[in-house]
Every structure is written in C-alpha cells, then in structure tokens.
Image (cartoon, rainbow, N blue to C red):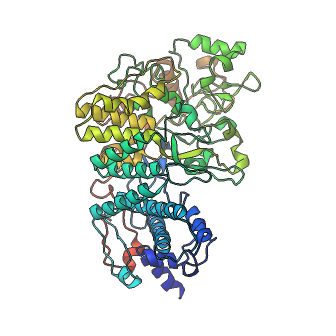
Amino acid sequence: MNKINKYLFSGIIAVSMTACADLDLNPLSEGSSENWYHDETEIEMAINDWWRPDFFPIDGIEWDDDMLHRDGSNDVTIGTITSQWGTAATRWNSLYKAVARATKVIQALDNGTADGINEEKTNQYKGEAYFMLGFAYGELATYYGDCVLNKGMTLEEAYEAVRTPKKEVMAYAYECLDKAIELLPDSHTGQQRPTKGVALGIKARFALYHEDWETAAQAAEQCMNSKVYKLHDNYGELFKADSSPELMFYFKGDLTLKKGYGLFDNVYNYVIRKIGGACNRSPSLELFCSYTCTDGLPINKSPLYNPKDPFANRDPRLAMTIQPFKTKYSTDYAEYEQSKIDGTFPEKYPEYIILGYEYNPNPYATKVYEVSSGKMVLSNDSKATNQHAAYNGLAMRKFVKDNWKDYKMYGNKADNCYPYLRYAEILMTYAEAKNEMGQCTQEDLDKSINLVRERAYKGSGIAYPRVEVASQEALRKIIRMERRSEFAFEGLRYRDLLRWRIAEKSHNKSMYYLSRAWSGSSEWNGLTGSESNLQLSSDFMTILKNWDDGNFPIGGIPTIDEDGLPDISPMETAGYITTFYKMSFDPKKNYLWPIPADDILVNDKITQNPGY
C-alpha cells in the first residue's frame, strides 16, 4: 500500500471496527489481529492495554472557566475549533480504535477462537470488553452527536457508512454497559480494572449528560446501594492519596517512569515561582467567587462575606483548592505577621504554607517565610519583586503534594492519582437527576449532596450548611455551584457547561487578571513615596492602593446568576482587575465537536456537524 493510500485508508478505518483492528492499531505487545486473541494470555495482554488515558480521554482544565491560562487562550476558549483540530481527530480515532479491539475480544470469546479460558475469566473479559464498547460510544455521542454505529460491517460497508442518530448510539452504549454491569465483579485486586460500580457510574454520567434523568438516577442509586464505595474522610487529603475507596477509576502517575496524567503531566505550570515553577496556570477569579459562605449562601447573598478578607467564612473547599493568603483586613493579621518574627508561623498557620514557603501575593511583600530556615527570604510570587508573579493573585492548592518540590527531577511530572471517576460524582449525579425529574425529596438530598457537603466541612469545627428541599430552580443553582466547588480541576467542568447549555454565557466573556505592573526590581525595599528606593509606576501604585483598600485580588461583591456564574466585569470598571483575553463560544456549533476532516475526505457520506 503506498503512503498516500495508506493515509487515506487509515481515515476510513476510524469508522470501521473490524478493519480498525486489522491495521496496526493493536498495542505493540500484540501480534496482528489475524493471529491474536487465541488464548487467555493474548486476550489479557490486549485488555490490559486499554486502561490508560489514550482510551479514556481527559478534558483539558484550561478549556473551562475555572482556570486562567497565562500562556494564552486555546481553540476551545476562543472558539477557533475546526475540522482540522487535532484533539477532535485524536479522540475520534482513539475511541473507534477501542471499539475495534473490544469487538475483536468479544468475537474471539463468542466464536470459540480463544481456547482454554474458564467461565469466570470469560465473563470478566467479556464484561470489560462491553464496558469499553459502552464507554467509547457514549463518549462519541457526547462530543460528536450522531456517529457511525458499527455492529459488524465489512470494510466495503465502512466506505459507505453514514452517521447513526445519537439516540440510537446511546441506546447501544447503554446496552453494552448493562451487559458489563451484569458480567463485571463488584471489586478486584491487582491492576485497576472496571467493576460493576464503575460501569454503573459511567452509565449514570452519560445519562446525565444526555438528560436521561431516570436512567441516571437509577444507575447512580444502584451504585450507591452496592455499598462498595464511600467518600474519603478528608477532602483535601483525597487528592494526595495513592488510593481511596472514593476513587472508582483513576490513573496513577509513576515518578520512576516519569509519567503523570492530566494536569500532572507538567506541574511546572502550577507550582509557585519560589521553587522554580511558572505558576502560569492559576485558579480563575470566577472560580474564587463561586464558593459559598459557611451559611451555604453565595457571596452576593451571605451577610458573612467580607470582600476585604475573601477567604474568611467560606466553604472549606475554597482554601483546599485555592492557596489561601491573608489580607491586612484579616482579624488576626497582626498575629499572623508576628508569628513570622517569633518563629511560630509553621505551627500556627500551616495552611498558608505551600511547598515549604509562605504564599503571600501582597504587592508590598518583598520577602516570605521559608520553613526550612525559619527566615524571611526573597519573594518570587509577589509583584513586589517579580513581574511575572501573581497573574491574578491566586495559586492552586488542590492536588499539591510535598514531593512536587522535586518536580524537576521527574521531568515536571507528579504521581498523583487523576480521579477519572469518584464516588462523590455518583452522589451529585443522583441529586441532580432527581431534581430535574421534579422528584427530589429531603431523603434524596441527605443521601447525596448533603453527604458531599458534610465531608467538606469535616474537621473544620463548623457545622455544614445542610441543603434543604426547595424549588427545582433553587436546587438547580445549588447543585451547579456545588459541582463547581467539589470537582474543580478534575476535567468535569467543561462537560458540565456543555450539557447545561450555558457555555454561551461562561465562554463569551473576559478572563481577568491583575495589571501587569510591578515594582520594577527585585531590589525594591517595599516602601513608597520618598522612602522608596525606586521610582514606582502609577499602575503599580494603583495595585498597592487596591491592596491597602481591601480590593485585592478582586474587590467588591459580584452578582451571581441563576446558573451560579459570577459577573466580575464591574471590578474591571472599578480598576481592580483587567482583561487578559476574551473567550468566544458559538452556540450554533460549539456544543458539538467537528467530525475529523480526514474521515469525511475518505467517505463523503459522513456529514459534518453544523458550522464546521
């Protein structure tokens, strides 16, 4: 086969399960599909290769409104996705590759090609193959809508294939997942593999996305009733743990192999500059404003919110997700500063320490506390000394482990578990589905969202704000804000914005940061006027004034709409923040991804999604 024909041929193969497996799409440990899948060893080797992000795509956290990406916008946030977009093509091809392999396994087990496998193993392998099929088709329908549904077409038929309506694709996905649920075990040991509960959780996730509320609620409740999974005791520690009964399906990094998954593939982007990181991806100011106060009310409704001390009286998950810092309006600010002088700072204020240093974006703070020496050392994370520090004053705390300080030794990788599916999502899915059906009772809330909230407050000494039965609209807002607080940086937000059909609001506005002004030198003495050793710019003086007036990093109180989206644009008018880039989202096309151009080139009967 010549190079051109091979290239064109590989495009059409993406829509052909059988042919896909025949063209160099098996893992390197396999032979070709013509002489593979004959015994237990070969089938297990093939199946073991599935459980990696190549076949379970992770959405970029930089695609949503929870993350400011200082390096710039991307195709998703500025709406420049085309049919040539590499991510859409890679995901499409990988999912169809998974379909091809899973089909081959099922055929081998059904037609007797694979010899010498006992009934227990046969059920396990078939369950895993059906799980892979159900997942792949659910993903395809979620991102591309109508897609080619192949239940055994020949290569010639694949060249003439047309897209199957999304409803039929999802029906087949549910059918496959139901077979997986029937065949898979409740638990396993050794290498991570899908279980009955994981299949139920994935089914619930897809059903929620496609507004099949009854299916979502039933699948979630069946998983809850199995009692196999439970919430981790401590929210913050969950994201540093190597394992947990809450982590239903996850990808564990390996520092020896220099492997990290999701955001852990390059933690240089997230760690503070004091240890050599860039900190150029930071929690957005919109996310910062989305956490409720300890009374359960949004910050624009709660009497507990103090915009001059924005971390005070907030949902504990805020300070476990975004690195907290003190402002001069904190009630204990004097004691805080004194503790750095008398050496009691690490004991009294451990939550303000990250990777061995005090985090303090105060634009006057030329120095920060270093835990190892007990001394104040040059700050790299404040505009007092560094032009590129504190783009919006915020830094990530969620997931950050002590060993991140050694990230350079491991190729910028971290070995955290990426939580692809965890039990809290099952509980939140149940609550949302029941509410959307108009059937949400107090009992439903108490066995779902209130368990998630209660865990968030555990160990805080504060009684959690119990969610009580309210109107469907009121509960919808609570649930949407709760999901944002609970799942920040876990790759769920972008999908949530799409399925709620509110991306045209969340992605047609500015992403904000602080003015780029800084002192002008790492040698600034931290003083102003005649006492300053530098001539400070008027823009930097504005930042200092905002800090002095309690308007850092955002100032004021934003409005929060019925979907839980804060509007912080008035803070730009007030001079507290500035636009970094404007996002763009076209509701006529961007709720679906494009079908890859190469596949349409080979088979012109495959239609393109509108607008592409």
Q: Residue furthest bottom?
A: 1
Q: Identify the residue at horizontal 30%, vertical 42% (top origin).
A: 433
In the image, taking residue 138 as reference, residue 390 lies left or right, namely right
In the image, taking residue 60 as reference, residue 413 lies left or right, namely right
Q: Quadrant location of residue 341?
A: top right
- The one nearer the camera, 195 or 547, is 195
Q: Is residue 507 visible?
A: no
Residue 560 position, x and y percent, is 32, 31
Residue 612 position, x and y percent, is 33, 65
- The one nearer the camera, 392 or 9, is 9
Q: Identify the residue at horizontal 67%, vertical 33% (top origin).
A: 355
- The one nearer the camera, 145 or 180, is 180
In the image, taking residue 72 as reference, residue 368 lies left or right, namely right
Q: Identify the residue at horizontal 56%, vertical 50% (top origin).
A: 188
Residue 611 position, x and y percent, is 29, 63
Q: Is residue 22 visible?
A: yes
Q: From what the image shows, is residue 283 above or below residue 605?
A: above
Residue 211 position, x and y percent, is 28, 49
Q: How many marks?
A: 0
Q: Quadrant location of residue 559?
A: top left
Q: From what the image shows, is residue 571 above or below residue 249?
A: above
Q: From what the image shows, is residue 541 above or below residue 13?
A: above
- The one nearer the camera, 98 or 565, is 98
Q: From what the image shows, is residue 438 above or below residue 248?
A: above
